[in-house]
Amino acid sequence: MGSQTSATGNRRQGRILVVADVAAERKSISTTLAHTGYEVVEAESGEQAIKLAQDVHHPLAIDVVLCDIRMTPGDGVETITFFRRKYPATPVVALTAHPDVELAVSLMRRGVVDFLVKPVLQEELRMVVRRAVEQRVSCKSPVCEER
């Protein structure tokens, strides 16, 4: 995102943006990812996540976005749509407490790379994020030049 070097070029395994309104869930996911070696940035709303991504003075290079679908206030689907449109090379993983097959299919059609049901199992979280970071790093498309 922006002109900042991708976090995957640093010593860390990648920079992950975790967007969730429930602090305990956000912290649990962030802690698991940080202990795995990722740099984690947290946002408590879609609005805050978008502001972080669009900060003109300090653009945030993100390798993967994990976004809760249902947040108050705001809408995770709108946040996911924003990141898919504005940063198409950045993989987005949807989080939800309410599995909904139709919504999952709709989000996958919009470019979401995976769908995690909360409470998220740590091993599943690590595996999904690892795959998403690998997808980001190995992207050869011209759209990947956004990094």
Image: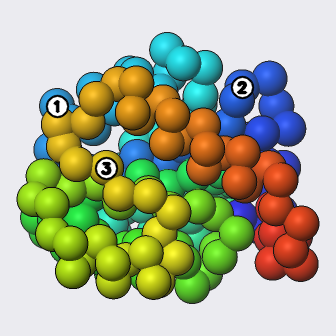
Place of residue 125 in the rendered image (x, y in percent of width and height, measured from the top left): 41, 35
In this picture, is 47 found above or below 85? above
In this picture, is 128 found above or below 45? above
Which mark is on residue 116? 3
Q: Give whichever of 3, 142 is nearer the camera.
A: 142
Place of residue 110 in the rendered image (x, y in percent of width and height, measured from the top left): 46, 83
Q: Is residue 24 visible?
A: yes
Q: Residue at the location (26% across, 36% down)?
A: 120
Element on which disc 2 rests: loop
Question: With 61 as the anchor, is 21 left or right in this view?
Answer: left
Element on which disc 1 rests: helix
Q: Amino acid at mark 3?
A: Leu
Q: Residues within 10 Å of mark 1 (few under 14, many from 20)?
A: few
Q: Number of callouts in the render?
A: 3
Which mark is on residue 24? 1
Q: Amino acid at mark 2?
A: Arg
Which residue position is annotated with label 2?
A: 12
Residue found at the very far top of the displayed protein: 35
Whether tag 2 and tag 1 are in contact, CB under 8 A, the answer is no
Between marks 3 and 1 in the image, the one whose residue lies nearer the viewer: 3
Label 3 to label 1, Cα distance in Å? 17 Å
Q: Residue at the location (52% across, 76% down)?
A: 111
Label 2 to label 3, Cα distance in Å? 23 Å
Quarter of the rendering containing residue 123: top left
Question: With 12 as the anchor, is 30 left or right in this view?
Answer: left
Q: Give whichever of 12, 114 is nearer the camera.
A: 114
